[in-house]
Amino acid sequence: MALAERILAAKFNKPGYDLVDHHTYVLASDGDLMEGLSHEAASFAGHLGLGRLIVLYDDNHISIDGSTDLSFSDDVPGRFASYGWHVQKVDGHDMAAIEGAIQEARKDSQRPSLIACRTHIGFGSPQQDTAKVHGTPLGEEGLKSTKKQFGWDPEARFLVPEEVREYFKGYQVSGSEIKSQWKKMVDSYKNAHPDLAEEWDRYVAGQLTPGWEDHLPNFLPDKPLATRSASGKVLDTVSPHLPTLVGGSADLTPSNNTRTSEAIDIAPGEFGGNYIHYGVREHGMGSIMTGLALHGLRPYGGTFLIFSDYMRPTIRLAAMMGLPVIYVFTHDSIGLGEDGPTHQPVEHLTSLRTIPNLVVIRPSDGNETATAWKVALQRNEGPTALVLTRQGLPQNSPIDNGLERGAYVLRSATDAKPDILLIGTGSEVSIAFEAANRLSDEGINAQVVSMPSWELFDAQPAAYRESILPPGVPGVAIEAGVSLAWGRYLGTENSRVIGVDRYGASAPYQTIYENYGLTPQRVVEEVKQLMG
Amino acid sequence: MALAERILAAKFNKPGYDLVDHHTYVLASDGDLMEGLSHEAASFAGHLGLGRLIVLYDDNHISIDGSTDLSFSDDVPGRFASYGWHVQKVDGHDMAAIEGAIQEARKDSQRPSLIACRTHIGFGSPQQDTAKVHGTPLGEEGLKSTKKQFGWDPEARFLVPEEVREYFKGYQVSGSEIKSQWKKMVDSYKNAHPDLAEEWDRYVAGQLTPGWEDHLPNFLPDKPLATRSASGKVLDTVSPHLPTLVGGSADLTPSNNTRTSEAIDIAPGEFGGNYIHYGVREHGMGSIMTGLALHGLRPYGGTFLIFSDYMRPTIRLAAMMGLPVIYVFTHDSIGLGEDGPTHQPVEHLTSLRTIPNLVVIRPSDGNETATAWKVALQRNEGPTALVLTRQGLPQNSPIDNGLERGAYVLRSATDAKPDILLIGTGSEVSIAFEAANRLSDEGINAQVVSMPSWELFDAQPAAYRESILPPGVPGVAIEAGVSLAWGRYLGTENSRVIGVDRYGASAPYQTIYENYGLTPQRVVEEVKQLMG
């Protein structure tokens, strides 16, 4: 969030027009600071010098198991100092001290600030400084006793004392004034900087530049192209027309093809760029993208598909909040080859499909990749995962392919009713395609379905779905991942799934595909067995 | 790993018998230290004072994107000092300096040690200090030039110089001597401490104490019991008979029911216990359990099922390495109630099932929970996830239930061939059970299948599987999670899945179950619709 503020400020602020200049405040607990994510985020914020980020650390020495002494001995201020943060310590029940520390923090515009506030959980209650008060309500007697402790009427409920009401009224007035001044400034900005103001309006409305889609490339059958490379070409042509797009990678930029040739790096003190080197921080990258999206920017970020596991909590939150984050997951199967089983995703495609409101797209070639980006960028109601190959793939689909509907017939059967359906996703579509050609030579009439996105397909009307997967026609699905969920489309009878239900292996990818039976020949054999 | 050494030393070492006293060495890169996991592990190691842990930090300033200046400005030694580590800095190409630093590190038995070694990637090659050399081979010319740089024969391949061979021969001799001395000590230990020696032999062989299963409790129909509570009772009765069992929780001990009444906490300087307060460090907990299992201990650790997302990379590694780690995932569905959608897993059960060689078990009551623990503890070839409820469930299954086969008939149909199959897992089994009773009143003959583990069921012979799920019989599955993969057992026709294909909600669990249609009434309705 604090980075989004800096990026927006660099993009829109002009002398006399500080459209964006807010601070970002965080309340963090002991538990938050034990989590690994706190390291990734704090280290990154320190590196970039996000001076408008102020973290109030609720240092209460208590977590659910009991005293933090059970598991936690960090010198937290020392730790944050090692990240290049401005660090202060205060009594967390001394309002004046907190106020003073916040003022000091705001003065330091070059470093994020940690204010370690020593507090007492359940302050003033009979259960002060105990783990119990973390999760259990105080109860009738506990409430009364606490109110008495502070000189309040023990019987009063939902009471806001008059002096509190008055105090906040002051902020109501001053807040209104600040808001109307800011609105005036924005109005006058429209005259002073009309082009930027137009962009600002689109940004505020969450709209992309009209006509950006016209810049999507058309991929022609040529030499094999990896979908990660196709993705890079798409970004190269559309990025210049999408000013709110902010790319990045968790230290796999040359592999993810996420950095366009004209990208400008975001760096300490330089926030006018559009590319972020997130470092080896996948979880942090996911969370930072969520923060960027919450500020109206359009983030995408790359890593290997295997490392989507590091990001799942943040993918889930983006999906739950309905934020249009785009994950660029390359090296999407055993097809990555020599790096071997630790780096070869097999369960990830299916496990991502389980996340509600995440759209997962695994395009099969260049044009499907272009359409996948179109879908992802046009999607406002939730995140999209693009699942891309390391290895080259032939170009089979036209520019106006059916990816937007999730699945479509890529190669029709010659008769109205096919003998067999061959269903593939991503890199396995061309295997299905080749198998269909061989079957055709033997007089078997196969319909090849490219099925890049289950979620998009499931959202289609039944009539469309049945036109693609006609009931009663036997099917063979081929996908370089676990077969677990394919019964959803193929049922338990009259069908086969050629998948990868074990860990991968280290070898050139052609060798692994051959050994794991992901070949046209295997598809042909399965079809013949199935058709008896 | 370093914690395992301490636990084993505390368990087995006696005066004159230091059976376990090794050091654990880590080679860590910039990237490793950017990852959040490094924070969880290093903070925890510092807290426990694991003095025999020595980390050599390969501080080469280069990652895949280029210079680490792009994303990383941590004062790494300062950071580790804040965790209470002993910290040194050396020239990473000065062998004598590294040797000296290691000796210093070994002298400090109370603090883990970081040795920051400033190195140059691709040292001596034409690509020294570049990102390219991280992932790309040097090539013919690069190899030759590098060899020349060090005064080696540029043409020699796979050369081990004679002086290196001689140097290592010395270690061969001294290593053999140390080994045979250690073996003698172990032999004499068998006379001096026969009981412990027996335990040691079992530990080395990876065997559990014979007869431990006799202590599994029998749960009788009584008041409703959460499976997390049943799990706690199982641990209470079996733990005293399993000396290599090491429990713990990521700061959810009172919720996960993972700490037995006789457990002893592991704490700084006190490693003789059997319970670990991991702090709010799920990923760290998973990785530490992997290290314990690699040392032959039998670790289990608890968190909420939702937080399994934080641990996926380490669950996958344990599964790939075939290690018997046990994950205790409680609060397993929308049934956790008031904590709401951020804490309610819906996709996690299915997404865990996608991981090869992980056995996922979701027991439906006390006796199934006891059998689940039996399966998990008897499993040597990979990890097991126990998926447990927060809410109370009725006791339906006998002590000798069919959980070990993954699925079994809990309530037979009255005729040989049932009209309908009702399949449930975990907390939804009792809903299926109740629905079967209601259907019976209406003359519909339902077979209730409790299906706690897909992996165990899939491993059964086809004949058994068909006896449980007879082909051609329509089925309704009910599970408080995404329905995505149920087509695997039910096919696409003649079946229904009552699942949760969206995020949860915050309310008392009964209200959510009602609103999400996870009720006997809904099952009855679906059955009637299905049977026309």
Image (cartoon, coloured by chain):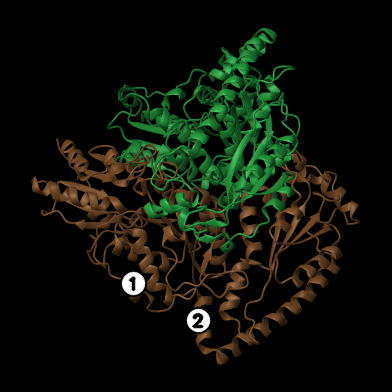
Chain colours: A brown, B green
Is the N terminus of chain B in the top left, top right, bottom left or bottom right quadrant? top right
Q: Which mark is residue A216?
A: 1
Alpha carbons under labels 1 and 2: distance apart: 21 Å
Is the C terminus of chain B in the top left, top right, bottom left or bottom right quadrant? top left
To which quarter of the image does residue A521 belong?
Answer: top left
To which quarter of the image does residue B377 belong?
Answer: top right
Q: Is residue A125 left or right of residue A312?
A: right
Q: Is residue A433 left or right of residue A197?
A: left
Q: Name the residue tied to disc 2.
A: A199
Instruction: Classify mark 1: helix, strand or loop.
Output: loop
Q: Which mark is residue B15?
A: none
Task: Please state the horizontal and vertical placement of residue B382, each as a whole percent of the image.
Answer: 48, 30
Furthest-top residue in this view: B191
Above or below, B396 relative to B483: above
Q: Mark 1 vs mark 2: tell me if same chain.
A: yes
Q: Earlier in the sequence, mark 1 or mark 2?
A: 2
Residue depicted at 18% across the width and 56% down the height: A411
Residue A355 shows in this picture: no
Q: Amino acid at mark 1?
A: Leu
Disc 2 chain ID = A
Task: Please state the horizontal and vertical placement of residue B281, each as a whole percent of the image.
Answer: 64, 43
